[in-house]
Image (cartoon, rainbow, N blue to C red):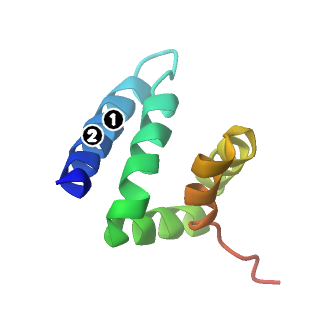
Amino acid sequence: MMRILCRIIGFVLCLFGLIGMLTPIPLGIIPFILGLLFLVPTTPSAARAVRWARRKIRIFDRVMSAATNRLPYPYRRVLRETEVKPDW
């Protein structure tokens, strides 16, 4: 039950975040990252999608790294699971 609730909350926050990013002042990044914090631990496909996006989209990786460094430890741990290793 808790897993389903986390998925619903994560999906709604990501949806609001995407809509908010389309506004002239992109305030949607905060709900989007919060939504990912709910989705990544409960949905393996979301974790794979975040890893793929971090590998392909450099600005997304930079935003996620900045958010990871500023968040408290329990949330930081969740986003650290999606970090990509450099290819060099």
Q: Residue at x 72, y 76 (%)?
A: 85
Image spot of residue 63 (x, y percent): 65, 44
Q: Residue at x 42, y 62 (%)?
A: 41
Residue holding disc 2: 9
- Is 20 in front, or is 7? 7
- Is 52 in front, or is 65? 65
Q: Is residue 18 left or right of residue 71?
A: left
Q: Is residue 38 left or right of residue 57?
A: left
Secondary structure under the numbered disc 1 in the rendered image: helix
Q: Residue at x 25, y 37 (%)?
A: 12
Question: Amino acid under label 1?
Answer: Leu
Q: CA distance from mark 1 to mark 2?
A: 6 Å
Looking at the image, do the residues carrying marks 1 and 2 touch, with CB atoms under 8 Å apart?
yes
Q: Residue at x 55, y 58 (%)?
A: 78
Q: Is residue 71 left or right of residue 23?
A: right
Secondary structure under the numbered disc 2 in the rendered image: helix
Residue extending furthest right? 88
Image spot of residue 73 (x, y percent): 68, 48
Residue 24, above or below 87: above
Residue holding disc 1: 13
Looking at the figure, which quarter contains the N terminus? bottom left
Q: Residues within 10 Å of mark 1 (few under 14, many from 20)?
A: many
Image spot of residue 11 (x, y percent): 27, 44
Q: In this rendering, does residue 73 appear at all? A: yes
Mark sitting on residue 64: none
Question: Amino acid under label 2?
Answer: Ile
